[in-house]
Amino acid sequence: MRAIQISRTGGPDVLELVDIPEPKPGPGQILVKHEAIGVNFIDTYLRTGLYPMRLPGVLGSEAAGVVAGLGEGVTRFKLGDRVAHNSGGGYAEAGVVAAARAVALPDSVSFEVAAAALLKGMTAEALIRRCFPLQAGQTCLIHAAAGGVGAILVQWAKAIGATVIGTVGSEEKARFVRELGADHVILYRHEDVPAKVKEITGGVGVPVAYDSVGKDTFEMTVGSLARRGMFVSFGNASGPVPAFEPLRLSRAGSLFLTRPTLGDYVAGPGELDASAGALFETIGSGKVRIEIGQRFKLADACKAHEALEGRDTIAATVLLP
């Protein structure tokens, strides 16, 4: 089968299209023939070495397809079932995953939408419903609001009844985020984000900020939070957050900071199914629309990474085998 593999860390050029043997499922595993593959920023972190992975290895955090093989003892799925997973090794025509880490895909959700939404959507679900349970009437700040996770967060927050302030890097992205329902959009490269947030909130600030950008937005986020606000740092698109003393949070208003990882919020099959179920129900209801802004062939994964890191993408990106 064809797969995108890396044998060393580095830029997009380390992504290699290779032919490797199709894996066989072992006990408790399933073989999934991929129909669509999601592209996520975490893939770039693994490619560059920011997050460690065994080399050589196949990138890819999520994919959707059909069960084509069953390992011994698997009762959770049967041959032909539609599934999605975020178990790694997604940049390939097929992959073996633990049955306990895959989820059933309802007929109402396409393979492309599932591949575009599972990791991002469950991340949004965990952030907005469990990490900081956003309530109707509250105001939230969402950085990179036009991105894959950001676009879902904007819509889910609006469905809850919250007021949404989104930051973006261009007028094109600002238009897109307004169409998603954001109440206020800030061009963070040209405007003073904390000043705008304070203006919007009557000088109070927001109780929560969801920040996937990292280094470039750290000070903006700290300056935008209300007293005892929650800084939810869940990505490093511009690089890791700079080191700081805990006293910085105290002086900024006794702030809370968390660095969540999705794996800790879908730690077992029960949590995984509940999170995916909530996501698919929200998509099915029409409250959250999954936008696929870019489609690339599997062989063009390098181009997909270049576009993602260049912040030239809107909403989700998928690879098609």
Image: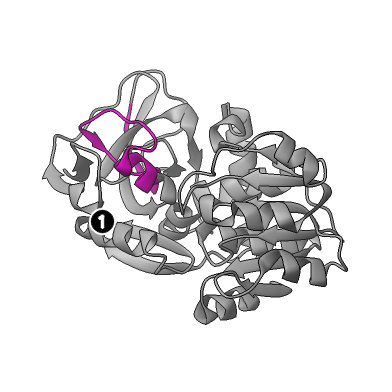
Q: Nearer the viewer, residue 69 or 175?
A: 175
Tell which of 262 and 252 is nearer to you. Answer: 252
Type of amino acid under label 1: Ala
Tag count in the figure? Answer: 1
Q: Which residues are magenta?
A: 43-70
Residue under the point 54% across and 71% down: 189
Residue 160 is left or right of residue 52, and the answer is right
Q: Give neighbour class at mark 1: few <14, some 14-19, many 20+ (Cα, 10 Å).
A: many
Q: Which quadrant of the rendered structure holds the N terminus? A: top left
Residue 118: % across, % down = 51, 49
Residue 320 placement (x, y as % from top left): 29, 59
The image shows residue 316 at horizontal and vertical percentages of 45, 62
* Disc 1 element: helix
Residue under the point 67% across and 67% down: 193
- In the displayed structure, 295 sits above or below 259; it is below
Quarter of the rendering occupied by the C terminus: bottom left
Tell me residue 24's x, y (percent).
Answer: 24, 28
Q: Is residue 137 left or right of residue 122?
A: right
Can residue 76 be spotted in the picture?
no
Tell me, yes or no, if residue 178 can be seen here. yes
Which residue shows up at 80% across the image and 66% down it?
Answer: 198
What residue would you read off at disc 1? 301
Left or right: where 221 falls relative to 238: right
